[in-house]
Structure formats: C-alpha cells, structure tokens
Amino acid sequence: MDLIPQLRRAILAQSLPPPSQTLLTTLTSRSPPPPIPSLLATAKARLLASDLTNTSGTVVDPSLPVFPPNIDLATVQESTISQNTHVQVLDIENLSLSRWEQVEELEAIERGERTRGRQVIRVTDEENGEVDGLSSTAGQTQASRAGGAAASGGANAVHRLVLQDGRGKKVFAVELKRISGIGIGKTHIGEKILLRAGAAVARGTVLLTPENCTLLGGKIEAWHEAWMEGRLARLRESVGADRPQ
C-alpha cells in the first residue's frame, strides 16, 4: 500500500490539521521508510508546532478551512461555523480572577510552583500540619491556594481565548461550558484546536463547549515565551499601586 495516502488518513483520523504534500513526501522518502506509527508521531509533532498562517506548504496544507468572512462582526447576533476549522491559540485569560490574582498565578508558574509535584506536596503538608522547606513561606502557600483551582482551570473558571485561523483572522472565544483542558498553565500559545462545524458564534465571539471543539495540544515555543513575559508585564503595569500587600 502507498505510504502517503495511508499516512494522510492516519493523520486526519486524529483530527490534526491537514498535512501538506511536501510534509508527507519528506516523511516517507526514507528507504526503507519508518513504520506508520513512527511517521505519524513525527507528523503530529511537526503539525502541532507549526504556524497555521505559514502558507509555504512545507508542513500544513495551505488550503485548510478557515473562518467565515464575517465571523468577527459584533453586529451579527448569532451565527455558526460552517465547517470544521483548525485554529491556534494566541492569548488566554481567566475571566474568573481579578488582575492581581492573575499576576500571582503567572508569578507562581514562573517560579515553578504550579507543577503538580510541588503543589501536591505543599497542600498535603499544610493540611497535615507538617512544615518543610516547600511550605515554610505561608504567604506563598496562600497565594498558591487563593483562587488556585480557578486559575489553573478549575470547575468554576471561565476563560477567554484569542484564536487565529490559517489566513490570520483572529476572533475571541469564550467557554460557554467548562472545558477541563483549557487553563493558564495548561493551554499553550500556538496550541491547536479543532472547532467543529456548527459551533455557535455570538456577536463575534465563538462559544466553546466540550462538544464543539477538540483540544489537540502543541505549542510554538517562541510565541509562548513572549506571551508569558509580555502578559505578566502588562498585568503588573495594570495592577500598579492597587495590588494588595
């Protein structure tokens, strides 16, 4: 069986962005070619790390579906996305937190305090009345716990994202229903999402539910680092003297 159509079917079966012919040819040109699972893993990594707006055709098929022309019009009360559309995340904000709480959350991530191992140790030690090096600073522990579930994507969090299609059009998207995979520290800039046909749009904003979108993962490293630095700086500036002491 020809490897190229076989690999393409395997990629599309995982809801990944459609690969370009160049990518498929490059991956299958080795002799002997790697097994399909290895080719699929390589293709997935490249697709999820790619910029969907790059129209060179080296990774993503440049003809991939995009947003409807008037999707971002705030004057249109209701509309829907007409076809399955792959997008990438450019920004994310937790609307459930105040600005200073968002600063504390990003600072905690920057210090490495949101990693699962340290977070579990800190909470468990405090609940058991034990004190060790990780829980010696009460203020840091309180900051980690204050709004922590919402900040990292808890059940009551509501996030707003900026999504971009393959032509560069940007739209806001808001969780209409909680999606557990979305959250600060979970969602990366450049991450790919598949919006399903029929997803609702209200006044220029896509309304996200677990049923109308599939989180595919991925990250564009340079974008994510720049976002982390820029977002934290902007939040610190906006908080200013109003930040609680």
Image (cartoon, rainbow, N blue to C red):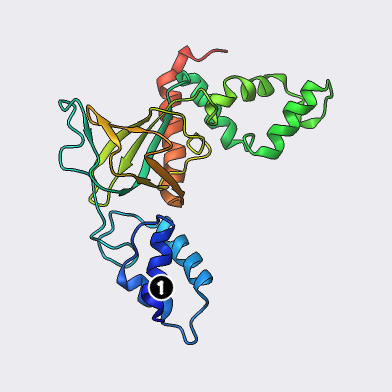
Local crowd size for mark 1, using a 10 Å CA cut-off: few (<14), some (14–19), many (≥20): few
Residue nearer the viewer, 234 or 10: 10
Secondary structure state at the residue bearing disc 1: helix
Residue drawn at point x = 64 percent, y = 22 percent: 145
Determine the residue located farthest toward the bottom in the rendered image: 31
Residue drawn at point x = 47 percent, y = 40 percent: 187
Q: Which image quadrant: the C terminus?
A: top right
Q: Amino acid at mark 1?
A: Gln
137 vs 88, left or right, is right
160 vs 123, left or right, is left
103 vs 138, left or right, is left
Q: In the image, residue 54 lies at what x, y percent?
A: 28, 58
Q: Which image quadrant: the N terminus?
A: bottom left
Residue 25 drawn above or below residue 20: below
Q: In the image, residue 58 lies at what x, y percent?
A: 32, 68
Q: In the image, residue 79 lies at what x, y percent?
A: 21, 33
Residue nearer the viewer, 228 or 56: 56
Q: How many marks?
A: 1
Q: In the image, residue 15 lies at what x, y percent?
A: 40, 55
Residue drawn at point x = 45 percent, y = 83 percent: 30
Residue 70 drawn above or below residue 222: above
Residue at the spot of label 1: 6
Residue drawn at point x = 73 percent, y = 26 percent: 123
